[in-house]
Image (cartoon, grey):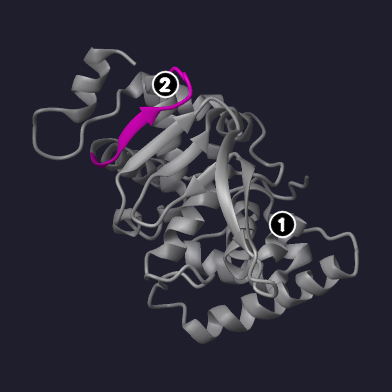
Amino acid sequence: MSRSWLARLRGTFAGAPRIDDAEWNALLAGSALFEPLSADERRTLRALAERFLAKKTFSAAAGHELSAPQCLAIAALACLPVLHLGFDWLAGWREVIVYPGEFRVRREHHDEHTGVVTEGDDELIGEAWEHGPLILSWADVATDLAQPFDGFNVVAHEIAHKLDMLDGAMNGVPRLPAHVTRRDWIGAMQPAYDTLVRAVERGRDTLIDPYAAESVDEFFAVTSELHFSDPALLAEAAPKVAALLARFYGAAAVAAPGSRR
């Protein structure tokens, strides 16, 4: 990343730095993900991305060469879920760490029945820590930009986790806007989650990725991915969840109408 670009990114003036017109237009032209956005939504997304670049710090890991266009793309993708919620919904954390591809994380697993604690490595493409960094695989971010309507979006997934953490509990129920009640949320999400869990336990094929059955917070994150990348599939699989997420995120899903995996 060039020093001159960083200097302009941070700026020495009040307010968020301006994104260069050519850089912004190149991002929009480079992915069909942004095509369904209205002119007003694109202007709002640009303003949010400018604030993201001003407020968050970026660092590369495992030898990745982080470029200015990559930072801009991540900023825009991270702000898409809060397009109608506002930048304050991205509060409480500052750092974005970018790996070239999948990264390995050591985990401890505690078996509630036996009390045995085991350690192992997980291969991840994204992770979100409460009050900590947003960690991403650039290879997967790039794939999501190139194939935006295939049902996967790692940034949307991890930002959903960040939204979930915003109220202090990662329980699949994020802080909610005034027009969505907790009863609305649980009434739509819990039955759909329970249905998915039963189907997965019985070995049935499911439209929603079985990983969403791991926990209620993963169900929220996975269905958020679908909201932005394959809303038609989400509406088929869990229509009440699709309607709820459209209300929560403040607009109809942005993916191309009728798109499917």
Q: Secondary structure at mark 1?
A: helix
Pick the residue in front: 165 or 238.
165
Please say whether residue 194 is one of the residues in the magenta stretch: no
Q: Is residue 133 above or below residue 61?
A: below
Residue 58 location, quadrant: top left
Visible residue check, residue 250:
no
Residue 201, horizontal then vertical, whole percent: 84, 69
Pick the residue in front: 211 or 80.
211
Pick the residue in front: 45 or 204.
204
Q: Which residue is outermost to the left?
A: 13
Residue type beneath disc 1:
Tyr
The answer to whether residue 205 is left or right of residue 25 is right
Distance of label 1 from label 2 (alpha carbons): 30 Å
Tag shown at residue 66: 2
Tag shown at residue 94: none
Q: Residues within 10 Å of mark 1 (few under 14, many from 20)?
A: few
